[in-house]
Image: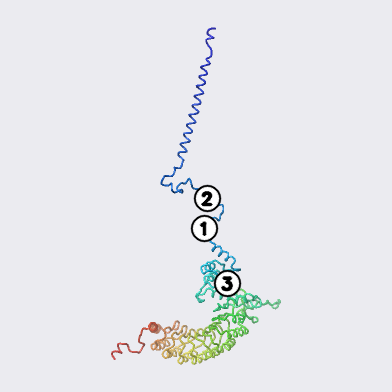
């Protein structure tokens, strides 16, 4: 009993033990929490951005904590400043220039330049033709329309170039009886003050219906192209254009079609009698025309006679070019009459035709009386020695012709002999072309002897003439001396001519 009583639970001890365990557990939890806090504090301290120093306190941008990255919601947003009121007005005028074009004259020069640099090149000509004179604008118009723009061929005027090429395109693409003439009639008043030259490189014929042929009438295409030229087809009438161009000075025309391809027909290249008559009347009435070219148009004797009959005593034409045609002796006689004090011509080009002896004699006769012509080109004809000698005899009397081209004319030694007399007596000639003629060694020697007495000719072409290397070399040396003499004369340096005494000889005498 006593022993069992003695074994009683120690409630106080257990309570103390329990409190001790609880205290230890709380202490452990607090110490763990403290360790985590210290670890977190050390981590924050490591990642914390250092505060700005006293040196950077005056520059807020130095502290990256105060900077924000701005992302614009507007994709067109930029740092550009707001446009000025002037720029806004110019922008409005550019957009509405076609309807508010009259305001151009009221702008200040600097604002006018800003406007003309921005307006579109597609604005109708009826708006810009008489209003805009700025060369920069017309330069943009030309380059926007054509890849090749050689403004030097148009008096270095971009506006003139635009209107001349624009009118050229309208005429070259005009199909008689098919094309509406509204564009042409509207364009002429706009460009009349700017067109000085027209270079028409093709003229389209009217569109005709293909003939209906039965099986028995069928022929091959080769036979049709070789044997049938078809009816004559008249082309564009220049009577609707030339009277509206008061300042035109040059007119070049080709009656033909470019790039005919598989549509080729001989009648596409015909210069009809009616075409000739209408053109002759137009040119005769155009008193400002100085240069007239009609090339590659199959102009024959009858047509050139019609042309010349209307051009007699024309007051202003100084250059006539009828090259690459089929003019014969009858046509050459008409040209000779034109040269015989009935024209103001200073240059005549009739190369690549069918002119023979009779035609050359007619032109030679006119040269004996003509006092204005300075350049004559008759290469690629069939003059022969008789025709060549006739021209040379005329030059013994003529005192104005300075350039002569007789290349490829079936000339030989007799013509060279006559020409050797010409170069001795004639002091007006400066350039002579004799290439592609069989003058031979004897002809070369005679020319050499004549050139030794000449001090004015600076160019003599003897290629493919078989004159011999020795004669050709000697003549080239003489030509070089003549060129140097002419150059010295231009520089007003006195060089004694052949046969005259030198200054030392004059003093000694």
Residue 8 appears left or right of 480: right
Q: Which quadrant of the structure image shows residue 229?
A: bottom right
Percent x, y of residue 439: 45, 86
Task: Kindly identify which residue carries mark 3.
Answer: 128
Residue 466 appears left or right of 8: left
Q: Can residue 171 be seen in this view?
A: no
Task: Kindly identify which residue carries mark 2.
Answer: 70
Task: Kindly identify which residue carries mark 1.
Answer: 81
Crowding around mark 2 (Cα neighbors within 10 Å: few <14, some 14 to 19, many 20+) is few
Q: Which residue is drawn at 52% across and 58% down?
A: 81
Q: Which residue is drawn at 50% across and 26% down?
A: 26
Q: What element carries label 3?
A: helix
Percent x, y of residue 8: 53, 12
Q: Distance between the residues labelled 1 and 2?
A: 17 Å
Q: How far apart are marks 1 and 3 (CA)?
A: 33 Å
Residue 155 appears left or right of 54: right
Question: Which of these two is toward me, 305 or 316?
Answer: 316
Question: Which of these two is toward me, 71 or 103?
Answer: 103
Q: Is mark 2 on a helix, strand or loop?
A: loop
């Amino acid at each position: 009993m006593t022993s069992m009583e003695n074994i009683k639970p120690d409630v106080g001890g257990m309570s103390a033990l329990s409190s001790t365990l609880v205290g230890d557990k709380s202490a452990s939890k607090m110490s763990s929490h403290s360790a985590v806090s210290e670890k977190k504090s050390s981590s924050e301290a490591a990642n914390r951005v250092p505060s700005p120093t006293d040196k950077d306190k005056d520059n807020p941008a130095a502290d990256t904590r105060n900077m924000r990255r701005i992302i614009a919601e507007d994709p067109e947003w930029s740092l550009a400043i707001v446009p000025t009121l002037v720029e806004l007005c110019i922008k409005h005028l550019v957009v509405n220039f076609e309807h508010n074009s009259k305001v151009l004259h009221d702008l200040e020069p600097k604002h006018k330049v800003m406007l003309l640099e921005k307006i579109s090149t597609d604005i109708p000509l009826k708006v810009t033709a008489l209003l805009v004179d700025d060369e920069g604008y017309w330069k943009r118009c030309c380059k926007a329309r054509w890849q090749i723009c050689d403004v030097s061929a148009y008096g270095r005027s971009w506006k003139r170039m635009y209107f001349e090429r624009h009118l050229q395109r309208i005429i070259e693409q005009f199909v008689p009886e098919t094309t509406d003439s509204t564009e042409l009639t509207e364009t002429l008043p706009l460009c009349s003050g700017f067109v000085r030259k027209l270079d028409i490189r093709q003229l389209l014929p009217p569109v005709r219906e293909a003939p209906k042929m039965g099986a028995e009438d069928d022929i091959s295409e080769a036979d049709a192209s070789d044997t049938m030229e078809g009816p004559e087809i008249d082309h564009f009438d220049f009577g609707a254009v030339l009277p509206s161009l008061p300042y035109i000075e040059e007119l070049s025309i080709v009656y033909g079609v470019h790039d005919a391809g598989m549509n080729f027909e001989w009648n596409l290249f015909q210069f009809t009698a009616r075409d000739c008559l209408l053109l002759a009347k137009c040119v005769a009435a155009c008193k400002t025309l100085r240069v007239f070219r009609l090339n590659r148009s199959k102009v024959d004797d009858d047509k050139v006679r019609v042309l010349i009959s209307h051009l007699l005593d024309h007051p202003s034409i100084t250059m006539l070019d009828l090259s690459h045609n089929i003019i014969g002796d009858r046509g050459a006689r008409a040209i000779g009459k034109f040269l015989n004090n009935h024209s103001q011509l200073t240059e005549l080009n009739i190369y690549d035709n069918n002119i023979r002896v009779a035609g050359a004699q007619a032109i030679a006769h006119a040269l004996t009386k003509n006092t204005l012509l300075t350049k004559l080109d008759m290469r690629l004809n069939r003059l022969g020695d008789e025709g060549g000698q006739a021209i040379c005899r005329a030059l013994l009397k003529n005192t104005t012709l300075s350039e002569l081209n007789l290349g490829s004319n079936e000339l030989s030694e007799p013509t060279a002999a006559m020409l050797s007399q010409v170069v001795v007596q004639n002091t007006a000639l400066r350039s002579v072309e004799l290439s592609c003629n069989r003058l031979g060694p004897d002809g070369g020697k005679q020319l050499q002897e004549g050139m030794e007495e000449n001090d004015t000719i600076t160019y003599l072409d003897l290629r493919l003439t078989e004159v011999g290397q020795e004669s050709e070399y000697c003549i080239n040396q003489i030509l070089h001396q003549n060129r140097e003499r002419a150059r010295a004369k231009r520089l007003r340096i006195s060089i004694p001519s052949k046969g005259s005494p030198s200054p030392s000889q004059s003093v000694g005498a």
